[in-house]
Amino acid sequence: MRLDKFIAKSTELSKHDVLHSIHQGEVSVNGVVVTKEAQQVHENNQILLKGVRLQPRPFRYLLMHKPAGTICSNIDEAYPSLFNGLEIDKCSELHIAGRLDADTTGLVLITDDGRWSFDITRPSKACHKVYRVCLSQALSGERAKEISEQFEHGIMLQGESQLTLPATLQVITPTEVLLTLTEGKFHQVKRMFAAMGNRVVALHREQIGAVYLDVEVGHWRYLTHQEVQSFLSI
């Protein structure tokens, strides 16, 4: 973690005051004065501000049911931020582990623990994400089998240099399927079906790893300790 972020997480100081304290030589790390805010530090380091040891606040882990027409950002842009629905202190310190498009609904994980979210999103961890997909064209039994086999093998998306990682397709109805991925390329689900000559008309994420979406649209809750730990064992 950056030194300035560590201090912000350990005090009530504003960003301006944090930088001022660092630049004035008021901060030491393991007995050495540090004046560069970008220096990386660890929670186990002895970090003092004016001689007082700092202890960061505990990390927070949430899940939220993202509504359509919102964006996975801390601030409003072309669409409103889904963070507007979070009534929580120091919301600006949080970030989303695996974003969804503005028109996509469903499960998002929110945290201020960067190492935890990094492990969830990197493909090498093979964290499963399950999407419910509504298609514009119905799939016949043979066509569904063909697409399923291609997804399991991996397909080449336009603009990419490697095949997609193996994905699992489960047909619910001719126009509704479940797709399980272990990666998250830009607009990946939509691009995968477009490559198969079909179009996604609605997209909803209902599971990440062992965590299922279990709150109403726009609502959120804290993850249980067991849910948080489940991602560490992926």
Image (tube, rainbow, N blue to C red):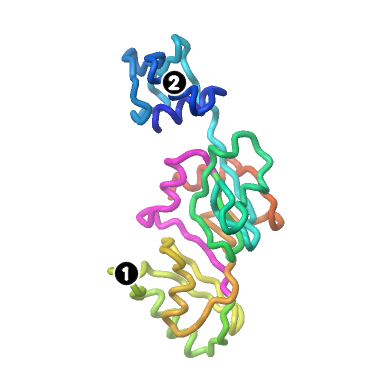
Looking at the image, is 71 positioned above or below residue 190? Answer: above
Is 220 positioned to the left or the right of 234 in the image?
right
Total count of labels: 2
- Assess whether residue 104 is covered by the magenta stretch: no
Where is residue 137? Give x, y as percent: 56, 86
Residue shown at the point (60%, 72%) measured from the top left:
202
Q: CA distance from mark 2 to mark 1?
A: 44 Å
SS of the residue under disc 2: helix
Is 179 positioned to the left or the right of 165 in the image?
right
SS of the residue under disc 1: loop
The residue to which callout 2 is attached is: 20
Along the viewing direction, whichever of 231 and 98 lies nearer the viewer: 98
> Label 2 crowding class (10 Å Cα cut-off): few <14, some 14-19, many 20+?
some
Residue shown at the point (61%, 42%) measured from the top left:
224
Residue type highlighted by circle 2: His
The residue to which callout 1 is attached is: 160
Residue stretch rendered in magenta on the structure: 111-133
- Assess whether residue 117 is covered by the magenta stretch: yes
Residue type highlighted by circle 1: Glu
- Furthest residue toward right: 216
Where is residue 42? Give x, y as percent: 38, 28
Identify the image quadrant of residue 34.
top left
Where is residue 177? Give x, y as percent: 56, 76
Where is residue 146? Give x, y as percent: 43, 85
Determine whether label 2 and label 1 are within 8 Å by CB: no
Q: Nearer the viewer, mark 2 or mark 1?
A: 2
> Label 1 crowding class (10 Å Cα cut-off): few <14, some 14-19, many 20+?
few
Tell me which label, 2 or 1, sits earlier in the chain.
2
Looking at the image, is 198 positioned above or below residue 55? Answer: below
Residue shown at the point (51%, 24%) measured from the top left:
10
